[in-house]
Image: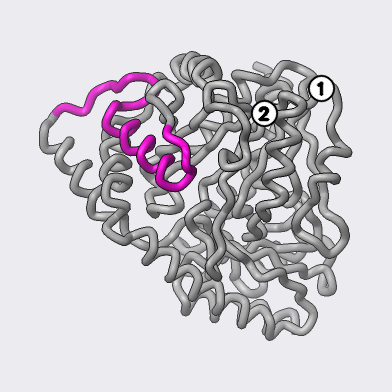
Amino acid sequence: MNLSKLALSLGRSATLKLNEVANNLKAEGKPVIHLGGGEPEEKIPGGADGESRKLLDSGFVRYTPVSGTAPLKKEIAAYTERYYGIKPGPKNIVVASGAKQAIYNFLISVVDPGDQVIFPAPYWVSYPEMVRLAYGTPIAVRPREGQLLVSAEDIEAHLTSNTKAILLNSPNNPSGQVYPEDFIREMVELCEARDIYLVMDDIYNRLVFDGLKAPSAFNFSKRPLNESVIVSINGVSKTFSMTGYRIGWSVADEALSQAMIKVQAQVSSCPSALSQAAAAGALRDEGGGFVENLRQGLEKKRDIMVAELSRLKKVKLHKPQGTFYSFPDFSAYEKDSRKLSALLLEKALVVTVPGAEFGLEGHLRLSYCGSEKGIVEGVGRIRGLLD
């Protein structure tokens, strides 16, 4: 039997592949240090634990409405009003099995063959493949030499009559950079003027440092939500350390949301009832200070990572402003990031993610969401090998 051309054309997720490699090495008893991961080490919030246990104890865990349960939608609406300044109605919200599915629901709902979706590099590894799955054309816009952020002019120069959407992730995975307010304002104005969707992948938007805030695109919109081109994507995986629960959501105009519900109904029916109960519990009390404690801990680890990387002789680094990733430039040691990543794994037993997977060669993504000891030892091993 032959596989489809689409399946054959897709690349494997680099980050998930490296997770598998790291786990296999650990199972073999090797002292591997995983600096390629994307999961906070903190336990889930008490509210999430309590609500999921309550549902389990009831003995009834059933299908839910395709777009999500009413209790979770209520908490998402309150959360969105609190941090975005806009209160969506139930018909504006679609709960999905992770933010990744929410993005995929959007792409399947709006992209036709030949349509283009634009996103800046460095980008999350799945963006190009997800656009291809929707039979669209991914267009990566690269920043100028030595920079990690593109300008509005860079984006506008790539627009064509086939452009259907612009996709932004801020704070950015892998760079940790936050797009400034002026850039977000210009993107909103550009998309509204041309009727192009602006998808804001806000999965890390609360994990920012140094007193910064990730600007809300809704603050710059001149349209009501049900006429908006803005689509906000979020979830509990990163901010609430609930990666295994697989709950994300979208906030968008009602017509688009209804289309996304139809897509989801045919793909996964509905998200897990147990996971939705846990997500509602996490959002209801914000984890009793959980998010702020997580953010403060990550800021401290960010500082440790930056200090350790600064000890390498030839590394160039833009200090991360959010997330739990750094994206140092190792090109002075080796321009081929896949080759360098493989070398570090083989010789130093340190897992990193090649920058080529994110659209920028010469860089490596190093995560600092693990232990402080692991950060220091991991970067120390890299330094010992390269310097």
Lower sequence index among marks 1 and 2: 1
Q: Quadrant of residue 343?
A: bottom right
Q: Which residue lies furthest to the left in this view?
A: 58
> Looking at the figure, which quarter contains the C terminus?
bottom right
Percent from the top left, x then y, of residue 364? 70, 63
User: At label 1, which amino acid type do we have?
Assistant: Asn
Disc 1 to disc 2, C-alpha distance: 12 Å
Q: In which quarter of the image is residue 371?
A: bottom left
- Please tell me which residue is depicted at 44% across the width and 16% down the height of the picture: 265
Residue bearing mark 2: 197
**In the shown orientation, is residue 232 left or right of residue 332?**
left
**In the shown orientation, is residue 196 left or right of residue 249?**
right
User: At label 2, which amino acid type do we have?
Assistant: Tyr
- Please tell me which residue is depicted at 42% across the width and 34% down the height of the picture: 87
Q: Which of 75 and 270 is in front in this view?
A: 75
Residue bearing mark 1: 162
Q: Give the range drawn in magenta.
A: 60-87
- Helix, strand or loop for disc 2: strand
Q: Determine whether label 1 and label 2 are within 8 Å by CB.
A: no
Percent from the top left, x then y, of residue 379? 61, 77
Magenta includes 131? no
Q: Residue furthest front?
A: 222
Of badges 1 and 2, the one in the foreground is 2
